[in-house]
Image (spheres, rainbow, N blue to C red):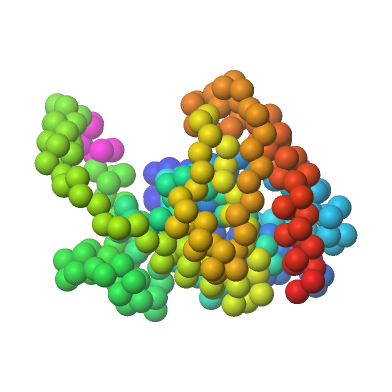
Amino acid sequence: MFETSLSKDVAHIRSLPAEAARLRQAPAGTLKVLILGNSLARCGLDRALLARGLEAASRRPVAVSVMHPDGSRVEEWRHGYRRYFDQTGSQPDLVLLCTGRLHLEDGLRDLDSVAAFYTSWADLPAFVRSEGLGFGDTCQAAAARASALFAHRRRVQPLVFYNFMPGYEQTVNLVQKTRNASAPTTRASPSCSNLASLATTIGASGGTLLILPVPLPESYELPALVKQTAVNAGARVLHASPALPPSRFPDGYHLDEEGARIWTQALLDSPEWKAALAGMAAK
């Protein structure tokens, strides 16, 4: 398929129905787990170790699915969860939302991506309302939802013009620098309506949402508004931050395999993790 050849990320998005089916078709009594996030989730959790730890703690077989498109954030997670998991009867028992500091506050970054890949036609009007889109953005969202080529135009355009237009890269860089220099610096007050909606949707089907701040080279705290929104919506924020040397972040951002193993084990050993699983069992 042409679009899946554009990037591994697109191939992952197109595999989400299969990820949902894994949970939907799991045998009765299985603990159904969804790892949700972006590349921090993909690189940060040792899935095999996690599954073994959950099986030992719950004394149940475990099915693990993933939804972690690179560069995604709370808008993609909210709408994608609803489309691929909630609306298809594939609701997990446990959602592990792996995040960095800046991924959970509202702030739509990629209108085309959310409309094309994470929103169904039935949900498009609700998406437009929730994001407060004007007429032009609404038309763009509808075009992205209707046409994969339109939605992929930012990926396709460089493939074409890098090969056939001399000086294309330099021109694009100049335009981007000019655009960034003229962009307004004011920022709306932070909000977390997408996180609240995601947590509410998960909770409505009896699921448990655990928010896991992924270790980064520099320590950080989630914004107070994010933590308060999580608490208000019945989610838990679990901090397990083992001391990790810079060598565990070979690209300066993501954990390597050993770093993922260390962090996953720290989660499994943390009192907060054990308390969260005990709370699930008591539901």
The residue drawn where x is 73% and y is 40% is 266
Question: Taking 230 as reference, is 47 left or right?
Answer: right
Residues drawn in magenta: 158-165
Q: Main secondary structure of the magenta part?
A: helix
Question: Taking 30 as reference, is 134 left or right?
Answer: left
Within the image, what quadrant is residue 143 found in? bottom left
The residue drawn where x is 56% and y is 27% is 249
In the image, is residue 8 above or below residue 34? above
Q: Please provide percent x and percent y for residue 77.
A: 48, 59
Question: Taking 106 as reference, is 177 left or right?
Answer: left
In the image, is residue 170 above or below residue 95? above
Within the image, what quadrant is residue 74 found in? bottom left
Q: Please provide percent x and percent y for residue 178.
A: 12, 36
Q: Please provide percent x and percent y for residue 93.
A: 69, 67
Within the image, what quadrant is residue 258 found in? top right
| Residue 103 in sight from this viewpoint | yes
Q: Please provide percent x and percent y for residue 207.
A: 65, 70
Q: Which quadrant of the rendered structure holds the C terminus?
A: bottom right
| Total numbered labels | 0
Question: Taking 152 as reference, is 165 left or right?
Answer: left
| Residue 11 in sight from this viewpoint | no
